[in-house]
Image: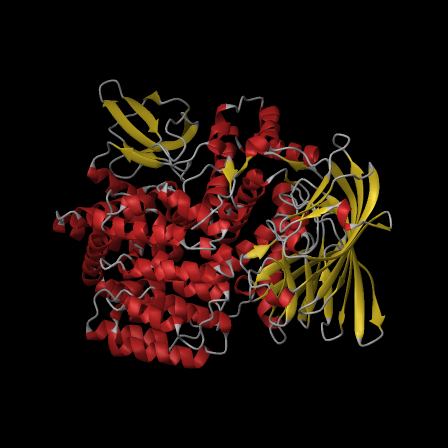
């Protein structure tokens, strides 16, 4: 029985830290199980006289403590499992502590730990407190000097900033001294020590400075870092051109590690990456991997200004760095990959993750008001919805005023830990607009619903459009404010001609009516173009209008959206027991016409072929019946495959690559279309199609095609599938990143035996629950990406997930907490399933010794 209730941390309780840490000197004597860390802090009081000095510290063995060189007695300080408190300290002094830690035993992968025989750190959000005693909060900025000593077997000794000194020591040891001239919070501290290969290059900034670039990887892997290094150089150039931001150190380093809870970390001058988001070559990385590497390298580099030079005052302001930086990396990817295709991909990800989050009990504001563990708020709401808010701000203000506001932000708050209020104030000042109402986007949870109705007067040639908004209650917020919502609208004729170009209509209250004159004929309304706001939209348009948009809308996002809407309606109608077979045939025919459009990009056509996901479909119904959705979606897939079979086969052959692999957008688009054709052909598994899919898999020279073929064969099942899985494993069993994909694709097994397969894989010799990549590939892949089998009526999928949460929580609470979400939406499912999900959540919550991470999310899901 739990005897204590963890207390939440609240934004309203924020108080500045009463001391300034002017400089921080760290000395590391690295040893796998007994690392000594000496910290010397130059401290100056900035708060009220008499306030004690309270430092965070967890899992630290204190060896000594002194103020101004004088050792403190045990009666001069208080020490518990979380804090070191010194009641009486001077107004200015030097504090020296020495602690011992055990990196080899750190399986939570936070703080200093071992990965692949190397030392590595991850300090965001609260990992630094497991390295030394320190005020581990983002508003305490300090200048760091770091000395690292280790055995010479640890060839490279790396930390933030510039290398000041290095040399040999007696006893086969060596050292390096690093200095970071920029003040930073503790969460940006980084250290890596080990044997690594390095790929080097340089970049000349817009002011003419030469920056050395180094990417450190596992021995023998340097060639696989070439694309990441190229992406880094393009990111640096783009940030100068798009935002006027120049890199500020003489050295920029990236290190790839296998065991990492995050995708990557923006530590000043020393980014640490999960190797899955850094290493790539055609045989071992898919086009999606290349896209993600490009995006994440850019994201972490862009943090140098939006996160490092200007950081968060407190963790409630997390969106200030993450939402803004996601907006920046999405803008970069749009320029690299094509604006329309990238926008569609970004919105698909937003709906799959953030809209689902908003629809369940884990919904929270972009700037939350309280938390138990900040680790639980590294969510799609903070990142993706945070980026959408920035995008809306740009839409409302216009590009010029937006850039002026951002430049003001950089100039005014450089070197500070600041707030969202201060950020928005810069745009209000630069534009001369009152943005008070806009701030509600940061404070209010939930996805707004916008309805559009219209009246056309043919005699007067006028069109009246009425927009109305509503946001459903979420936990702790039963009453919602009206939000300023930019809705971009254009008009088309019935034959697809443009009647009126795009115009932004700003819905600021509960409803708004606009009247347009000179509309010569009854229009087809194209609303929310470019997905101008993160809302759900319903209209009073005729069903036929969607086909006009699907065929002719010049806004490619809305053309894709029209196709998704048509497919969604057909699938949900069948799932509800009212199939529209005539409509399904018409949709398949329209899709075939879209595929024949010579002006359409292959990457765009590939997106058209992908039906709405089962998760997306589940957001449109209440209660959710996953089995009915799955069967209805499969039925439409099969109809399309039969109707377009010859066309799909023809396109598949035409998209065959005949030259050297290139990761560029155009080449990736052709591969995407080719694999989309294979995916659909698997829905009509007659002998000729199966033979084509097997040939696609066996002839694949790039991993993108191999994975496309393997996924399609899993849908086909039977002997061709098992033969391919065995061949893939035999070929790639010694490549960890590729083998992750082998586990991941099987987690999505659509057959009735999916859970049996997944359970067997948890006992596979190559499965390691301690490695976050491998664990997420299988367990999270099954729970999040295989809804029909996860939601098996027996409840076995829920029991499996709860067991995994409890097992992993014992050593990696952060990874365990991320698995709560698939159970969290239990209220939205049919009662027979919802009750089973709730019971497993209750079992998790009642488990003894549960971490704060899992306890918080399980409690919120049940409350």
- Residue at the far front in the pictured view: 75
Colouring used for the render = secondary structure
Residue 488 in which image quadrant: top left
Residue 608 vs 509, above or below: the answer is below
Tell me where residue 121 appears, x and y as whole percent. Answer: 64, 59
Horizontally, is 799 left or right of 220 in the view? left
Residue at 54% in and 56% down: 262
Where is residue 789 shown, x and y percent of the image? 27, 61
Query: Is residue 781 rendered to the left or right of residue 12?
Result: left
Instruction: Give percent across and percent down for residue 48.
Output: 75, 30
Specify whether residue 261 is in view: yes
State the residue in front, 636 or 68: 68
Q: At 69% from the left edge and 32% from the top edge, which residue is drawn?
A: 412
What residue is rendered at 22% in x and 65% in y?
646
Q: Position of residue 455 (x, y in %)?
A: 24, 23
Q: Nearer the viewer, residue 630 or 93?
A: 93
Q: Confirm whether residue 551 shows in the render.
A: no
Taking depth in this image into account, of 183 and 690 the one nearest to the observer is 183
Q: Nearer the viewer, residue 460 or 747?
A: 747
Residue at 60% from the left image edge and 73% from the top image edge: 221
């Amino acid at each position: 029985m739990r005897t204590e209730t963890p207390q939440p941390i609240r934004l309203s309780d924020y108080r500045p830290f009463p001391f300034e840490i002017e400089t921080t000197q760290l000395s590391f004597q690295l040893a796998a199980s007994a690392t000594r860390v000496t910290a010397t802090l130059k401290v100056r009081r900035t708060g009220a006289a008499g306030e004690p000095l309270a430092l965070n510290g967890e899992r630290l063995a204190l060896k000594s403590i002194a103020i101004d060189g004088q050792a403190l007695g045990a009666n001069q300080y208080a020490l518990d499992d979380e804090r070191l408190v010194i009641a009486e300290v001077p107004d200015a002094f030097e504090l020296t502590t020495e602690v011992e830690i055990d990196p080899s035993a750190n399986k939570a992968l936070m703080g200093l730990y071992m990965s692949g025989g190397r030392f590595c750190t991850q300090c965001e959000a609260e990992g630094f407190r497991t390295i030394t005693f320190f005020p581990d909060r983002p508003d305490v900025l300090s200048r760091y000097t770091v000395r690292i000593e280790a055995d010479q077997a640890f060839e490279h000794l790396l930390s933030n900033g510039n290398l000041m000194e290095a040399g040999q020591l007696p006893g086969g040891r060596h050292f390096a001294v690093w200095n970071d001239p920029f003040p930073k919070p503790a969460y940006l501290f980084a250290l890596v020590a080990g044997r690594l290969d390095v790929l080097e290059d340089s970049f000349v900034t817009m002011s003419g400075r030469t920056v050395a670039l180094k990417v450190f990887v596992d021995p023998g892997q340097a060639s696989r870092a070439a694309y990441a290094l190229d992406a880094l150089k393009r990111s640096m150039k783009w940030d100068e051109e798009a935002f006027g931001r120049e890199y500020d150190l003489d050295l920029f380093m990236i290190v790839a590690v296998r065991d990492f809870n995050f995708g990557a970390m923006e530590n000043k001058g020393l980014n640490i990456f999960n190797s899955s988001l850094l290493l790539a070559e055609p045989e071992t990385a898919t086009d999606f991997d290349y896209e993600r590497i490009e995006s994440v390298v850019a994201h972490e580099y862009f943090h140098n200004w939006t996160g490092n030079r200007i950081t968060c005052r407190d963790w409630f302001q997390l969106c200030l760095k993450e939402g803004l930086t996601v907006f920046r990396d999405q803008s970069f990817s749009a320029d690299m990959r094509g604006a329309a295709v990238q926008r569609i991909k970004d919105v698909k990800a937003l709906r799959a993750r953030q809209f689902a989050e908003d629809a369940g009990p884990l919904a929270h504001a972009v700037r939350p008001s309280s938390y138990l563990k900040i680790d639980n708020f590294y969510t799609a709401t903070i990142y993706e919805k945070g980026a959408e808010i920035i995008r809306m701000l740009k839409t409302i203000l216009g590009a010029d005023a937006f850039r002026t506001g951002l430049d003001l932000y950089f100039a005014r708050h450089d070197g500070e830990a600041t707030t969202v209020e201060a950020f928005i104030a810069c745009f209000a000042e630069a534009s001369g607009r009152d943005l008070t109402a806009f701030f509600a986007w940061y404070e209010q949870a939930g996805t707004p619903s916008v309805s559009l109705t219209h009246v056309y007067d043919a005699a007067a040639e006028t069109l009246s459009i009425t927009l109305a908004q509503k946001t459903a209650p979420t936990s702790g917020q039963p009453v919602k404010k009206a939000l300023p919502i930019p809705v971009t609208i254009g008009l088309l004729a019935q034959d697809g001609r443009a009647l009126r170009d795009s115009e932004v209509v700003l819905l600021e209250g509960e409803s708004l009516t606009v009247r347009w004159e000179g509309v010569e004929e009854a229009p087809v309304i194209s609303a929310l173009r470019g997905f101008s706001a993160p809302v759900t939209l319903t209209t009073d348009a005729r069903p036929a209008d969607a086909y006009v948009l699907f065929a002719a809308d010049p806004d490619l996002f809305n053309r894709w959206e029209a196709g998704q809407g048509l497919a969604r309606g057909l699938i949900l109608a069948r799932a509800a027991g009212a199939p529209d077979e005539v409509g399904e045939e018409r949709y398949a025919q329209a899709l075939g016409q879209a595929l024949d459009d010579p002006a359409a990009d292959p990457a765009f056509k590939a997106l058209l072929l992908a039906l709405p996901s089962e998760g997306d479909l589940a957001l449109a119904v209440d209660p959710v019946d996953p089995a009915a959705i799955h069967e209805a979606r499969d039925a439409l897939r099969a109809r399309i495959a039969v109707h377009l079979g010859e066309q799909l086969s023809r396109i598949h052959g035409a998209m065959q690559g005949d030259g050297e692999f290139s990761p560029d957008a155009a080449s990736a688009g052709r591969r995407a279309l080719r694999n989309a054709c294979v995916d659909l052909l698997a829905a009509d598994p007659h002998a000729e199609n199966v033979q084509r899919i097997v040939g696609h898999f066996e002839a694949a020279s790039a991993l993108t095609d191999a994975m496309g073929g393997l996924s399609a064969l899993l849908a086909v099942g039977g002997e061709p599938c098992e033969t391919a899985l065995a061949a893939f494993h035999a070929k790639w069993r010694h490549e960890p990143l590729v083998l992750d994909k082998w586990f991941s694709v099987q987690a999505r097994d659509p057959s009735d035996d999916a859970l049996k397969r997944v359970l067997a894989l948890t006992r596979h010799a190559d499965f390691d629950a301690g490695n976050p990549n491998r664990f997420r590939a299988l367990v999270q892949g099954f729970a999040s990406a295989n809804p029909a089998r996860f939601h098996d009526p027996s409840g076995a999928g829920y029991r499996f997930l709860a067991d995994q949460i409890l097992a992993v929580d014992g050593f990696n609470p952060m990874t365990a907490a991320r698995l709560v979400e698939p159970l969290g939406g239990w209220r939205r499912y049919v009662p027979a399933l919802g009750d089973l999900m709730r019971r497993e959540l209750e079992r998790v919550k009642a488990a003894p010794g549960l971490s704060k991470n899992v306890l918080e999310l399980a409690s919120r899901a049940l409350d």
